[in-house]
Amino acid sequence: MDVQVSPTPAFTTDTQTRKKRGPRRYILAAIAALALIGGSYYGYDWYTNGRFIESTDNAYLRADQVSMAPVVSGQITEIYVSDNQAVAMGQPLVKIDPRRYEMAVREAKATVTAREADVAKSEADMEHQDSIIAQAQADLDNADENARLAQQDFDRTSPLAARGIESQQKVEQVQSALEQAKSVIRLKQAVLDAARQEIAALKAQVEQAHAELAAARESLGKAEIDLGDTVLRSSISGRVGDRTVQVGQFVQPGTQLLTVVPTDKIYLVANYKETQIGDMREGQPATIRVDAFPDLELTGVVDSFAPGTGAQFALLPPENATGNFTKIVQRVPVRIKLDTAQKDMPALVPGLSIEVSVDTRAAISPKVAYAQ
């Protein structure tokens, strides 16, 4: 018996195909719509915000750290701080053997005492010379008086001798006495002049004694400074780092012993490409992310711009006027000040890597970034 199978209508296959393609079309359309919306949003966000944001990951935290080194030589006898310890300004860090410097202070004090004695002696000599001058002046006055009396005797005797009342011998005696009195005047005047000339020499001695006393006092001051410098004190507040000093070590002036880092005065330096700084100004806000704290966002402001690119301050700056030339985009260090009053501010240390973004829409300062 033959069985006849009726054929399947063609429209059934087409309908099934359209049913399968329908959801796919909707999905693709939805994806395209989302992509269009996302692209539009991204484009709008870039046009209104993103094109004004200049970002770089070539940024690092910095601090104006101070390398502590002695200014006197000697052997280290005491170390008052340990690694990573917080210190205050003026706090003792290390001590150098002070015995040689204490001896120098005592010697300088003895020299000052000797110079003070020289000053006292020279001033006493000056006062004594005043007495000598006064005595010489009195002797001269006395000689003048004697000469005046001798002149009077001569004036009385000469007329009498002319009339024969007095002898010629008497006249000669009176005249001789007058000449002697005049000689005494000349002698006393010479003594007085010599005493007065001695004053100049004594004044020079007094001035020299005072100068030597001043020099001795300066030497004492230097010795006391050197003695005080045997205790190395911190010049800033911060934390101790890079400590290499050991007890018993002999150090010379300038030997780096440790470093004090002011961790409460951290700032960052972002090395922006020269093509990014055209719209940057001092005071513009910055958003900061620290690699060590990826979930933390900090804020800051542009503080200042370097007076040249980083290449200009390199040990061997480039010389583009010689040889073949390849243009390389330069970078300009931009100093950014952190807002240290932020909540949940972590303990930051110099050297940490930073990602920073500067909003160039805020034209705080009319000063341009690169060349003024």
Image (cartoon, rainbow, N blue to C red):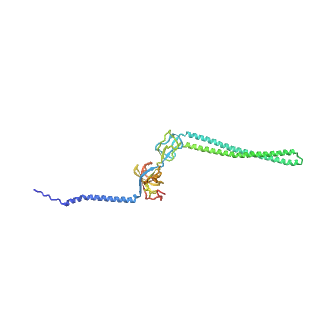
71 or 167, nearer to the observer: 167
Which percent across, then down, holds residue 130? Answer: 71, 45
Residue at 58% x, 44% y: name it.
Answer: 222
Outermost residue toward the left? 1
User: Is 150 displayed left or right of 256 in the figure?
Assistant: right
In this rendered view, identify the residue nearer to me: 264 or 61: 61
Residue 138 visible, this angle: no
Q: In this view, does 291 lie to the left or right of 184?
A: left
| Residue extending furthest toward the front | 323
Q: Nearer the viewer, residue 174 or 79?
A: 174
Which residue is at the far right? 164
Q: Is residue 17 visible?
A: yes
> Residue at (23%, 58%) from the top-left corner?
17
Q: Where is residue 293 in the image (x, y as percent from the top left)?
A: 40, 49
Q: Is 162 above or below relative to 17? A: above
The x and y percentages for residue 315 are 47, 49
Indicate the quadrant containing the N terminus: top left, top right, bottom left or bottom right: bottom left
Q: Position of residue 49 (x, y in %)?
A: 40, 58
The quarter holding residue 14 reads bottom left
- Total tally of numbered discs in the picture: 0
- Residue 38 as seen in the image, left or right of residue 358: left
Residue at the image position 61 percent from the left and 44 percent from the top:
215
Q: Locate residue 27: give its quadrant.
A: bottom left
